[in-house]
Image (cartoon, rainbow, N blue to C red):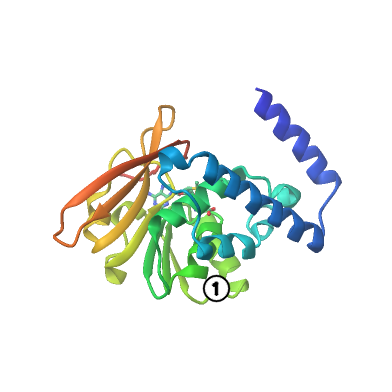
Amino acid sequence: MKRHFALGVLLFFGFSFPLHSEGFDAARHKMVEEVLADTGATSSYSGIPALSPSVIKAMGKVERHRFVPTALSALAYLNRPLPIGHGQTISQPFVVALMTDLMKIKAGDRVLEIGTGSGYQAAILAEIAGAVYSIEIIEPLGKEADTRLKTLGYRNVQTRVGDGYYGWSEAAPFDAIIVTAAASHVPPPLLKQLKPGGRMVIPLGTQFMTQYLMLVEKKQDGSVTNRQILPVAFVPLTGEH
Ligand code: SAM
């Protein structure tokens, strides 16, 4: 209740006092500071003591205000999720940074994202990886994100509208996979499309119950390990499976 009131107040002020480019830069800098502070505060259970320089650089570079509805642009650098329409959200910046860090992406890697949403997470991945493939199930969101990413010049991102549960077999295998909606289990097609030595980051659980962010690693011999990272709250992975 308090949170809704707070968002209402923020929305009001967001409408009233739009930020301009220097304001956005300063706000983004502050957002990165908050993300770093959250990373430190959660390190004892996430196992991530500090974000890697490539992730910090990407978070400081990608302009989150370009990925939220214009009416919410003044709120874009709050360290919190925001609505993007169709009942969906752009994830909290701290969660975006942590999930990206857990993927341990190297330059040249091929990565798959399930849940394009606004395209923000795809842009962060594209700053670090060689090629990003992103799938969104809600057609208007997927198309908007594709246009946005192209307009912003991300030539190493390919998007597709469809059910990400089945992955993108023609572009597989992937060095890393990120699922940005909560699933009840690790989708077997995604595990199959992960390279040996690859990492998948996925929230597991149901919408109104506890969900945990999980790190799934496929070892060189094909065996799979799972590690619970943090409790999280994601929209559900939808589709018929
Ligand atoms: N990564 C997004 C961003 O940066 O804005 C935020 C993702 S939002 C938390 C989750 C997204 O997953 C929603 O846009 C939702 O429509 C999408 N989604 C849910 N189930 C899906 C599925 N089976 N396949 C592909 N996308 C799915």
Looking at the rendered structure, the kind of residue marked 1 is Tyr
In front here: 197 or 209?
Answer: 197
Residue 103, position as x, y percentages in the image:
39, 58
Kindly give the residue lying farthest to the top in the view shown: 1
Image quadrant assignment for residue 15: top right
Q: Left or right: 19 with respect to 149?
A: right
Instruction: Give the quadrant of the C terminus.
Output: top left
Q: Left or right: 7 with respect to 198?
A: right
Q: Residue at x 75, y 39 (%)?
A: 11
Residue 76, position as x, y percentages in the image:
68, 50
In front here: 106 or 200?
Answer: 106
Q: Residue at x 82, y 41 (%)?
A: 13
Image quadrant assignment for residue 185: top left
Query: Can the viewer see residue 152 in this picture?
Result: yes
Residue 105, position as x, y percentages in the image:
40, 65
The correct choice, above or below, for 182 with respect to 109 in the image is above
User: Mark 1: is the Cβ under 8 angstroms from ligand 1?
Assistant: no
Instruction: Give the quadrant of the N terminus.
Output: top right
Q: Residue at x 85, y 48 (%)?
A: 17
Residue 209, position as x, y percentages in the image:
40, 27
Instruction: Give the residue at mark 1.
Output: 154
Numbered disc 1: secondary structure: loop
The correct choice, above or below, for 36 with respect to 221 in the image is above
- Mark 1 is surrounded, within 10 Å at the Cα level, by few (under 14), some (14 to 19) or many (20 or more) other residues, namely some
Query: Can the viewer see residue 241 in this picture?
Result: no
Kindly give the residue lying farthest to the right in the view shown: 16
Q: Residue at x 51, y 57 (%)?
A: 121
